[in-house]
Amino acid sequence: MKTVVIASGKGGTGKTTLTALLAHRAALEGTVVVADADVEAANLPIALRAESTSCEEFAGGATAVVDPALCVACCMCARACRFDAILWPDETSFAQTYRVDPLVCEGCGLCAELCPSDAITMVPSIAGRACVGTAATGPIAFGELQPAQDLSGKLVTAVRERGDALADEHEADWILVDGPPGIGCPVIASVSGADVLVAVTEPSLSGEHDLRRLSELARQFSLLVKVVLNKADLSERGADAIRHLCKQEQIELIATIPFDPAMAAISVQLADGDDSAATLPLGSEAAEAVDIIWREIASALAPTGDPAGENDQDIAILY
Ligand code: SF4
Ligand code: SF4
């Protein structure tokens, strides 16, 4: 079983669309489990028409809650909160006592300690959910982080653990992980135990910058990196810069995908939550690029002496 993480330094590079298309491609050759580790924008379940079979709530920190019946309006909490999370009584609203803005509260507990009338309780909050289910390509694990929660690294780990368990249960050949954007804690959690990192980038200054950071991260974890340059024809200069960077960083550029309106349309559909037609026309340049990417990944991870691709037949891609 091999684990492939598809990542990008930022959002909007087509990472999730590519992950969905690769999952379809992989499913033609074996059993694939997908894991959506992009828990702050979990679009892969939409792309793969997933239905959850079970979800577990994921505990976060705590949020302060004021009991208006006990509050004597002494103002100590509002003066002490360094995050300005306590809302003062407001003549323009119906609120007659102090309240806590749950989206701003950091859960430090200071206000509850100070309150002279024990009017404040720290209530455990739910940071999100970790789910498993069935997708168009087979088993799927995914997470959903609640707004204003910052425990995405831990939730990513929970999603990865569920993905690994599904892979064991189904004796999967592949785990495809849709990684979170950036290079922070969630990305580090997503690449744990991976066999290859597929870095999706685009021909822009930010794409170049993000790819460099992703390459540095991969080096720290001794991860094999394969680069995919998406929307390659949007900037010749930007594409040349990415090629140069790959040589400099000694990472392999395995495919360039031209800007394909069909692929862009899929991205827009997914962003809108529309999973009705996540397909690529057979024979399009983007469809062929996806096939090449899959073969390169499979070949790179094939056991020595059994190079993947040697015995591959031409398989029609049916997305
Ligand atoms: S410290 Fe307690 S009593 Fe004082 S304003 Fe805040 S909630 Fe009310
Ligand atoms: S728990 Fe901390 S952050 Fe939240 S309202 Fe109280 S003092 Fe402010």
Image: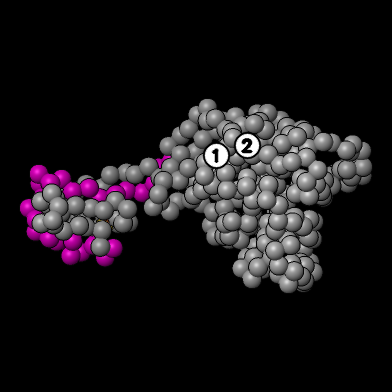
Which numbered dot is residue 277? 2
Residue 12 image offset from top left, x and y in percent: 59, 56
Residue 212, compared with residue 275, is above or below; it is below
**Badge 2 amino acid:** Ala
The quarter of the picture where the C terminus appears is: top right
Residue shown at the point (61%, 61%) measured from the top left: 9
Residue 77 vertical position relative to residue 287 in the rendered view, above or below:
below
Residue 212 visible, this orientation: no
Q: Is residue 273 above or below residue 170?
A: below
Q: In the rendered structure, which amino acid carries the disc numbered 1?
A: Asp
Mark 2, secondary structure of its residue: loop
How crowded pointer 1 is (Cα within 10 Å; few <14, some 14-19, many 20+) is rated as some
Characterize the local packing of mark 2: few (<14), some (14-19) or many (20 or more) Cα atoms within 10 angstroms.
few
Q: How many marks?
A: 2
User: Residue 232 or 69: which is nearer the viewer?
Assistant: 232
Q: Which residue is mark 1?
A: 274
* Image-based side of 253 in relation to 13, left or right: right
x%, y% of residue 238?
71, 69
Mark 1 falls on what kind of element?
loop
Residue 242 appears left or right of 214: right
Q: Which residues are magenta?
A: 58-83
- Front-most of residues 60 and 42: 42
